[in-house]
Amino acid sequence: MGGCFRPGDEPEPAAPRRPRPRPFPAMRQLSPETRTLAGIGLAFLGFAILSGGDVLAKYLSARYSIFEITTVDSLAALSVVLPLSLRAVGPRGLIPNDPTRVVLRAVLGAVSAITGFLAFSRTSMADVYSIAFATPLIVTALSMPLLGERVDWRQWSAVLLGFAAVLFILRPGFAALRVGQMLAIGSTLTWALSLLLMRRIAQSERTGTILTTFLLALGLICAPVAAFEFRTPSAGALALMAATGLCTGLGNLSLIQAFRLTQAATVSSFQYSQLLWGVIFGLLLFGDRPNSATLLGS
């Protein structure tokens, strides 16, 4: 009957809700201003580490296929990320709360990495990074309608100035775009969309889930092509490919934590710092001398 209670009628306990991921524990008590500064520091660090991976990929691309390099890159990063994630949260902890967005972000990030590495193999680092300056503009323009984040006039001024620099460097209508530049544009568009999704999912997904899914997508996309372009690497080259994977993992880890601490427009604006590394590494390691348009635009 309605109000009667019989043994065995106890309702099953609800499945425990997985806790939302948090930034590093020590940062939970920080003021909003300090959290923003910490996010900026992590963004700067993340882009610097990713630049290191770009340098290694460009160096290795002289002898090995980009798809082979990226396959080893993803496997090396997975060999570190996956065991640590499984130890921390177990297999069930790696199941995404929002599989569609997590997988979409992973695919966009993988496509951006592949086209970016291909661009580096065909043109100078400074030129690729200069084109990538459009990323903050795209992220800033879309962060308000897609993420509901407020963007003030100072952020808009900074990104518009950066975009004007991109137009000056590319000089549309004065010369045909080269293959390397078109690859860089494709990498920029997919990277911007992946950053917006990262900001969204970073609030509800575990770091291990985001990283593992991205690295799996990267490996699965590249491995079939790498099988046809495989060239047995030397021990030194294999170590450098593994180091590229380490840069991929650590760089993305820093950016994930940065997005948990501050706005997408703020994090993405620090991609401008990559031009500094691009000019320095390109000049010292590859003899890439940036032209006057690149120098003035940057």
Image (cartoon, helix red, strand yellow):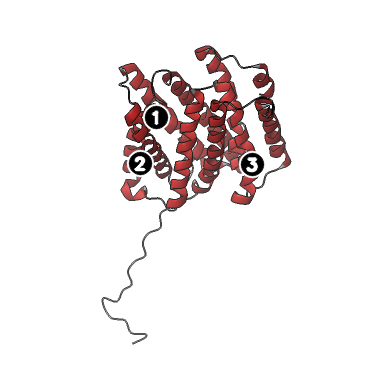
Disc on the earlier residue, 2 or 1: 1
* Label 3 with label 2: CB-CB less than 8 Å: no
Q: Quadrant of the C terminus?
A: top right
Q: How many marks?
A: 3
Which amino acid type is marked by label 2?
Ser
Please provide percent x and percent y for residue 124.
55, 20
Q: Which residue is mark 3?
A: 140
Q: CA distance from mark 3 to mark 2?
A: 32 Å
Residues 283 and 27: in front is 283
Q: Is residue 8 left or right of residue 94?
A: left
Q: Which residue is mark 2?
A: 85
Residues 176 and 76: in front is 176
Q: CA distance from mark 2 to mark 1?
A: 26 Å
Disc on the earlier residue, 3 or 2: 2
Q: Residue at x 38, y 24 (%)?
A: 241
Q: Residue at x 43, y 43 (%)?
A: 210
Please provide percent x and percent y for residue 295.
66, 19
Q: Residue at x 40, y 58 (%)?
A: 17
Regarding residue 68, the answer to whether it shows in the image is yes
Residues 4 and 297: in front is 297
Q: Nearer the viewer, mark 3 or mark 1?
A: 1
Name the image quarter holding residue 140. Answer: top right
Please provide percent x and percent y for residue 221.
39, 38
Name the image quarter holding residue 186. Answer: top right
- Helix, strand, or loop for circle 2? helix
Q: Nearer the viewer, mark 3 or mark 2?
A: 3
Residue 85's place in the image compared with 11, above or below, is: above
Q: Which residue is mark 1?
A: 67
Name the image quarter holding residue 155. Answer: top right
